[in-house]
Amino acid sequence: KEAFEKELTEKINKAGKQAEYGNLLGDFKTYYTEIRDYALARDLFTEVVLLNTELLQTGYKLVQLEQLYQNKGEQAFTERKNVLYKGIDAFYKDYHAPLDKAVFEQLIALYAQRLPKAFVPSALENLDAASLTNEIYSSSALTNLEGFRKLLEGDTATILANMRQDKGYQLVKSITETYLKLVAPKWEEWNAKIAATQRKYMKAIVELSPKSARIFPDANSTLRVTFGKVKGYKPSDGVYYEPFTTLEGVMEKYIPGDYEFDVPEKLIQLYNAKDFGPYANKQGKMPVAFIATNHTTGGNSGSPALDAEGNLIGCNFDRVWEGTMSDIYYSPEICRNIMVDARYILFVIDKFANAQNIIKELKIITPQTKNKKSKK
């Protein structure tokens, strides 16, 4: 980071562009500092309310319905209400209130604890998560299909009155109104400044780089195709990371009961028996992951990794720690993407999960079949 900042500053000074670009890094630091609490609040709202607590998800749909009435009138309200009434059964088909209740109790406590104090809604002040959970899930109509639909029956005034009396709806509305009033506008303001500075930053990079320089674009919201080589790297003096890992490394990190490093008993048995099927490497070890010089970014997780002949050899899922800055500055010396090895995927499907129905559907290419194909 320090080396990159020094290099960019030197380029700006050498080009005599201090007035135009001299404040770039300082502006980034200011804006990211200012947006930090708003970004945290936004992430919490998204994860807890919109994505991971189903009662809050359905309640949010009703909050939007009321907002539609206030902003666009009764006709728009009625049209949306009818769509909700008819379409919500697909959601409740798989809804399980006891599970959602357990998730709600944990996440609503996390929301109140992690949210910056200035953004805590009145409904969550001095929160007793267990008491609030029991109150809502014992009374709210949002916990079942029949209750949800009943809230939407009657004329507009009746529907709004019934919604506002529901404990679940009251909570979602309190959380949402606080978020929309205190968080969303400021997040959008600072994010717009960051976006503008990012455009200016890229303009500087293009202008100050040699004409022969390879400049990697921001690939967000685009189809990304990147290429590279399987290759280890040297992050610091005296340290070198090999490009491949094996199941031995998983077992070295094994910590019983740990949420990150626990290992299923069956996997331990397969490892001890060295029962890797046809998926072991030439040394008899079970490959797990490998790294390469591909330039990846957020959204590449799950991307297929293909060899030169188009065969699936892995699945991208991460970047190495030293290369996480590659969205801003790609360094071929230390930027590596991490892929799970296709052999490990097949091993898990075949030996661990015994999902032979899946194995039978796959065309598995081995070095032997590749060699035969090339001779033909």
Image (cartoon, rainbow, N blue to C red):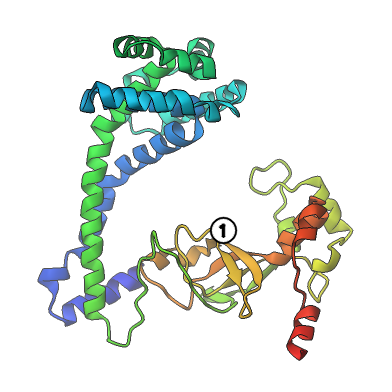
- Residue 316's image quarter? bottom right
Name the spot of residue 174 as percent of width and height, x first.
Answer: 33, 21
Count of marks placed on residues: 1
**Which quadrant of the figure contains the C terminus?**
bottom right
Q: Which residue is labeled 1 in the image? A: 302
Looking at the image, which residue is at 47% across and 30% down? 110
The amino acid beneath tag 1 is: Gly
Furthest toward the left, the residue is: 19
Q: Can residue 298 be seen in this snapshot?
A: yes
Where's residue 145, x and y in %?
A: 53, 19
Task: For residue 108, say whether it is visible.
Answer: no
Q: What is the secondary structure assignment of the residue under circle 1?
A: loop
Residue 186 % position (x, y)? 23, 40
Residue at 52% x, 70% y is 336
Residue 370, how many percent across, how many down? 75, 81
Give left or right: position of 236 versus 153. right
Callout 1: few (<14), some (14-19), or many (20+) C-alpha neighbours within 10 Å?
A: few
Question: In the visual, does 129 lie left or right of 126?
Answer: right
